Image (tube, rainbow, N blue to C red):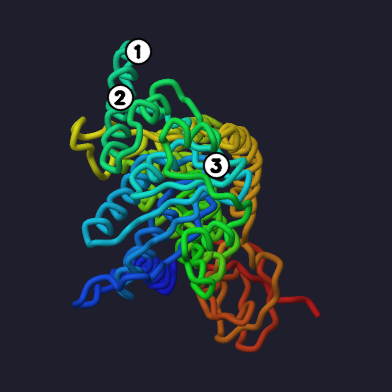
Amino acid sequence: MKPLTFVLAAALVLALAFQAVPAHGQAPAGGCKAGTYYVASLNAGIDPGAADFLTSSISNAESVGACNFVLVLVTDGGDGASMQTMITAIQGYQQWGGNFTTVVAPQGAYAFSAGSYIAESSNQIFMEPGTTIGSATPIVSGIPTGETNSTMTKDINAFASYMSTLTADHGRNQTATSLMVTKGVSYPDQLALKEDVVNGVIDSTTVQGALAYLGVPASTPVNTPGIRSTLISVLSNPNVSSLLFLMGVFAVFADIYHPTVILSVVGVVMVALALFGLGVFGASPLAILLMVVGSAFIFLEIKTQHGISALIGVAVFVLGFFLLYQFPPAAASSPASGPLPPATFSGIPDIAWGLMVGLGAAVVVAGLYLRSIREALRRRPKVNDPAALVGRQGTMESDLRAGGRGVASVASEEWSVTSSQDLRNGDPITVKGVSGNTLTVEKLST
């Protein structure tokens, strides 16, 4: 592998790692400025990209002294660690002196699962007609065999306690919000207002109408996720990272047969991006190691050609892939319930199962391809292979007595030669055989 490949890959990973860390602005010495607003709009799943966007936005709001932060939220949930990163950032903004408001808008929007926890951590929550909030029962990973019922009960109770704490901190109905967790209850706008789950329902169906209702000046920009946050969201998707990882490994090993600097760089960059995404996602080192080992076994098939290595590789890679969904421990904890268990608010998607079927098919195709690579490598002529010179013609470069040794030029190279004939310098010859690195030649008949 070219050194340039590793340099480029390392530079890329460092650049992404640097970009992944939000730039925290310094708040003005005088604190927040009354009547100032910062608006952020998030219409996406709760993942590391969403967490990066909100934490960066809050830092920007503090840096300009915005006393009021408005989050326009539409989400169907996501992973627990990112959710708690976002809640921690919201709580930090409130401690700084800012007022945080979540608006579920426009009409038809929803804040489900992790989104409902984020909303309930806000100072105020407003909804528009036709919107919904709730359904916050977690999907807890890593439950030991035989402990499913007891562990799930404990974990759901922990998250219910956490939701109650968030809700009570802002004077809303903690009994109603706890039902979001324990029973998976969702509240449409009017029912949410009646049950004191939210602070109000805005008589508008648009985002701009909601912002106007809250007193946000019309000139205030609505910030949305940028390239960095979007890239983090894409790469932190375990399906995307796994595909990138596998494609990168294939590209690197295909370079054995098609040696090009470009293919090597592309392959290593893909692997680097995948590892970055898995790291941001919080994948366990064991999962990543299993994927690496699985890939190595798949390509060991180049040498073995028995199919066993490929099957082992697929099994190990698939195991590592599913371990990606064992989410890391939550980043923050509830004061009432202690550390929260590892959890997410969305299950393994159907695309993950489809990916595994596709992987099996890809390995079959790759196995055939790798077999063709091996056969092609076997048939490739060796560099400076004397056997390939049999039948070639050349010229004597020295005199040669029968049975002795001399020098001849064959295929533009000088070779040690022997012959049963006397040959003179300049005689045309033909190669009849090879013994080691010595050619057996005869005088070419004219």
Q: Residue at x 63, y 44 (%)?
A: 108
Looking at the rendered structure, the kind of residue marked 1 is Asn
In front here: 368 or 81? 81
Q: Residue at x 36, y 27 (%)?
A: 178
**Which of the 4 image quarters holds residue 306?**
top right
Q: Secondary structure at mark 2?
A: helix
Q: Is residue 393 visible?
A: yes
In this view, the mark in front (3 or 1): 3
Q: Residue at x 74, y 76 (%)?
A: 444
In this view, the mark in front (2 or 3): 3
Looking at the rendered structure, the kind of residue marked 2 is Asp
Q: Is residue 175 above or below residue 99?
A: above
Give residue 207's position: percent from left, percent from top: 58, 58
Q: Residue at x 47, y 47 (%)?
A: 126
In front here: 370 or 415? 370
Q: CA distance from mark 1 to mark 2?
A: 10 Å
Which quadrant: the C terminus?
Answer: bottom right
Residue corresponding to mark 1: 149
Q: CA distance from mark 3 to mark 1?
A: 30 Å
Looking at the rendered structure, the kind of residue marked 3 is Tyr
Q: Is residue 390 above or below residue 350?
A: below
Give residue 296's position: percent from left, percent from top: 44, 44
Q: Secondary structure at mark 3?
A: strand
Residue corresponding to mark 3: 110
Q: Which mark is residue 155?
A: 2
